[in-house]
Image (spheres, coloured by chain):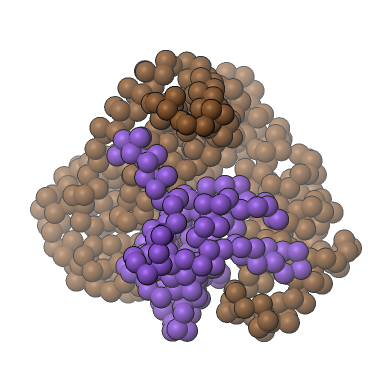
Chain colours: A brown, B purple
Amino acid sequence: MIPTLRPFTRPPTRSLLSITLAATCLVGGAGAQDFDKDVRVAIDHKRLAVRRAAATKLAQAGDAATAAVRAAIEDRGRDAMPLALIDTLARANTPADGPLADLLSELAADQEFYWRAQSLDGLAARSRTASLPQFRRAVQDPSHLMRVAGARGLLNTGDGATDRQRVLDLLTDEDPRVPPRIGILLLEQGDRSGAEAVLKGLLGFERRFLDDPWGAREAQRAEKALRRIFGERFDALFLTEAEQLEDTEAREAANAAAARLTAHLGLERRALETTIQANESASDPTARTVGGLDIRSCRNGDLFLSWTDAGEIFVGLDFREQTAAPDSFDEVSAALRGLGDRAVHGRVVCDFLRVREGETDRKAAPGAIPEELQTWLKRLAVELETTDRDGLSAALRSRLVQFDPGD
Amino acid sequence: MSPLTWIAAAAISLLPSSSTLVDPTEVDFATLSGFDFKQGMDLPSEITAYNGTEIKVSGFMATEDGSPGPVSEFLLINDACGCEGTPKINEVIFCYMADGSQVEIDPGVVSVTGTLDVGEEVDYGVVLSLYRMEVTQIDT
């Protein structure tokens, strides 16, 4: 039996089995048999950190461990592979055309595979030119993570202006998480074309969908990237009076970072501050929304719908599109509120569906949507057919097929 | 919120509570995960200042295997969707209920209050956790 998580802070009670697994599998040798053990630990161990450590050991072995991973996939199926394993293998330092890269290529091409974007990103990091067609397809993929991974691949392996344009086109991607990430990729290559998108990501830290503070996560992502590129005190750019820093060394570092950033962005510092203030004045209808639907699908792409009690329906994480709700939408809205209860249905690994309004807050894994919620979702899809927004109902239906294959 | 306010708020959020007898110190994941963790490193002083203090932090509940509970231990993470990548060790708080009670995994953002234990929990060279919390309250 794998130990429970109880002994976080109580080492004396830690299970011997946990130690045994860690000891035999993480400190052991590098033979094929060991790799089989490592793969088992990387998949099955209860503790995330132990799974990740086993995955790291496999990644360090690189191509030599690929056969063991492939055998596990054939034996147990791709869905049994945890993100920590694929993610770690994707970031391994192996050649662009070796066995591990070949495996990642197969995984990235499987639209049903949860971690295909991480697999593709591994190919992008390896600058695998053989994957160029995959990268080109990926920038059109419904999954935002695939589009970003594809862009990285194109920037590393692309063939001329057309491929570069494919990347630049993503700076106006409809998913607000994409442009800042593309901007970061470009900045990392010394290209400031997407600098404004990165700043928007940085400054959009208050954005939320339902109760999810996604803007804060994107802001932190942008901040870390800018810190990596421009140095530790880049943030002092936003301290208009950086000169007021008491510590001389900090003040000089802040001013130097600010100078590098503004020079790189091609903006005067004052112009940058104006841009920032303009961003701040942008408003969103978060406060007016009373309910919403949040579908995360690595296969079909995410779908975000929200609505107010004043007849407005918004599409997108950032309420990008607005359409009028049908007259009878109030009844659909009330029916959702009437479901009540906060609950998670099924085992959520990656993809999930969540609905929320009033006291109702339900989250479900594919194949685990309870009947009353299925009924409501079908009713919502019918209702959306009568909105002016083309394809909205179809977009919902296509995702519901994944969550309820029997539909 | 202006950038200046943001910076000021971030700075304030780094300050530890002057007393654990008053309201718990509100901490966010941006602070807890705002540094690149490397095993064996000296943790930033603003992080170690939270060790042993009562804090309140918002995030998403999750289990190691994705099951919905009921559980007496859970992970608190910053992202509802696991698709973005495996959380780093400083992006996870390993929580356990102080009284051993069992709770359901909540579908949305929760505020969790409890005593934070900061430091590497190492087993055979593997850092199993960096943040652990003995939870006394969960607010939805």
User: In which quadrant of the rendered image does the C terminus of chain B lie?
Assistant: bottom left
* Residue at the image position 82 percent from the left and 54 percent from the top: A61
* Quadrant assignment for the N terminus of chain B: top left
- Examine the rendered structure and indicate whether residue B57 appears above or below residue A93: below
Where's residue B7, x and y in %?
A: 40, 39
As rendered, which of B120 and A291 lies closer to the eye? Answer: B120
Q: Position of residue A290 (x, y in %)?
A: 20, 56
Q: Decide if residue A214 is in sight here.
A: no
- Total number of numbered discs in the rendering: 0
Indicate the quadrant where residue A38 lies: bottom right
Q: Foreground residue, A133 or A261?
A: A261
A364 relative position to A329: left or right: right
Pick the residue in front: B97 or A198: B97
Q: Determine whether, in the image, residue A242 is placed left or right of residue B3.
A: right
Q: Quadrant of residue A122?
A: top right
Task: Give x and y (percent) for residue A380.
Answer: 24, 59
Residue A145 sits above or below residue A226 on the image: below
Q: Residue at the location (62% across, 19% down)?
A: A160
B38 displayed left or right of A270: right
Q: Residue at x 42, y 15 (%)?
A: A268
Name the image quarter holding residue A52.
bottom right
Q: Position of residue A20 (x, y in %)?
A: 77, 77
Q: Is residue A54 above or below residue B97?
A: above
Residue under the image location 80 percent in, 71 percent down: A23
**In the image, is residue A278 above or below residue A290?**
above
